[in-house]
Amino acid sequence: MKKVLSLGMAVVLALSLTACGGRTESKETTATQAQGQTESAQSGKETTQAASNVELVATRWSGGQSDDQKELVKGYTASEIVIDDVAYDKLKEKETLSMQKSGGGDYDLIYVAEVWCPDYASNGWLLPLNDYIEKYNVDLSMYNQSLLDTMTVDGKIMSLPTFTQTSILAYDETAMQRYGGEVPKTFDELIACAKWFKENEGTGIAVPAMQGQAAVDLFGAILYSCGGEFIKDGKADLGSDEAAQAITIWQELCKYAMDGASTWHVDDVGQAMKDGVAPISISLSGNCSAYLDPEQSAVAETVKFAGMPGVGDKDYVGTANFWGWSVAANSENPDEAFQAAVWLTSPEQEKSASLANGSISALPELAEDQEVLEKIPYLPAVTEALAHARILPTAGDSSTMLTGLQAVLSEIATDPDTDSAALIKSYNESCKDYQFGR
């Protein structure tokens, strides 16, 4: 059950926010105030709306970004937002337990990973937002459309996208000058670049090729960029020509990767960049801020960033790791919670978060904001990589299939001369009985 602020607390809060009006507003008045604040936030204008008597509890993973957000939400005066941050490995469990409660859960606002959204939606735990979007005239054009589409299930928008990260190219500009070529625009060019560094300088490209999720994320992006799918017509589709092309690209990247890359996760790639030993890398955007820190990085003055390459003349289709703000279906304050979600994902608040900790927003317009670009110079590369973003499959036996794929990719990374096309077709055959219905 959601708590109502005591009169004494309400008075203190109202005075601290220099707000006007009492604490006995009707629910209709509260919603009107929230709408005014949200419209003001979306337009980038300041607001002086009075605080309501509604306390909204939001859950998210803990850490530096959460600490910053606790400070930022103090600026929201239409309701009080309380951030209940939870260790990442416990977050889904706590959210699930809350959303399953009848008569109101512990949380109004749910921080949802893109891979959790289909499950949460199919169980009826999230409130579809379409009617609220229309009711409050929310401008959806501000969001990355690919990410918004990913959070849409059966035509129902279940979450408003916010923090995101994905793979981009990071490279040492002085090394690329030695190479003498342009920044790679296709995977063929990237492989040629990696081969040159491997054969001429004994380095190569830094990639996260160890057995694990990062390798599957990267392979998934390559597969999608080739026009392939993991699943087609309800069956595993890793035996396709597109999958064979994708696995060949993976094999070539691993062949010309830096020594030891078959045991590297994304943090190991990041360390190779910071140490100045990697001339070029496929890096997770969340690690890139450290490349710019002269106290951590040997390439702080020379590191540059670019979007991921495509396959031939096809656009790159990235695999996105991102989060969105959703309203719990059992929230007792759905209107207020929705308005808070819009405020949290508004340009003004997303910019504040980016400047506070370098977090990357799902709002493409921030990629052109000079103040944000000074803080996050790799933001245009991320925006480019996410322009056609998709997620990995989640339904049915998808998790089992992707876990097995980790071993296939690792085998190829360990022995780049293996027959990768035969291996992926054989693995696809082993998945023939998997079921991928929701």
Image: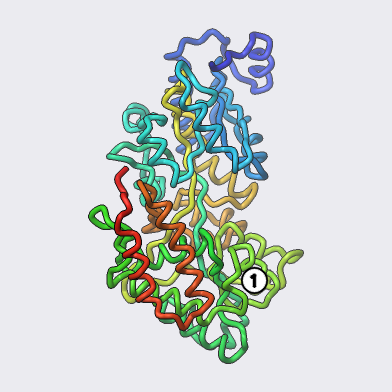
Q: Which residue is mark 1?
A: 273
Return the residue found at the far left: 233
Above or below 102: residue 168: below
The residue located at (57%, 38%) in the rendering is 91
Q: Amino acid at mark 1?
A: Met
Tell which of 158 and 263 is nearer to you.
263
Name the image quarter holding residue 122: top left
Tell which of 376 and 310 is nearer to you.
310
Name the image quarter holding residue 335: top left
106 lies left or right of 149:
right
Disc 1 crowd rating (10 Å Cα; few below 14, some 14-19, many 20+) is: many
Return the residue found at the far right: 295
Q: Residue 294, how many percent across, how many down? A: 73, 66
Name the image quarter holding residue 14: top right
Tell which of 409 and 423 is nearer to you.
423
Above or below 56: residue 235: below
The residue located at (36%, 32%) in the rendering is 129
Q: Residue 414, how many percent across, how many down? A: 53, 76
The residue located at (61%, 79%) in the rendering is 259
Q: Determine whether the residue tagged by mark 1 lies in a helix, strand or loop.
A: helix
Q: Residue 111, how many percent across, how many down? A: 51, 37
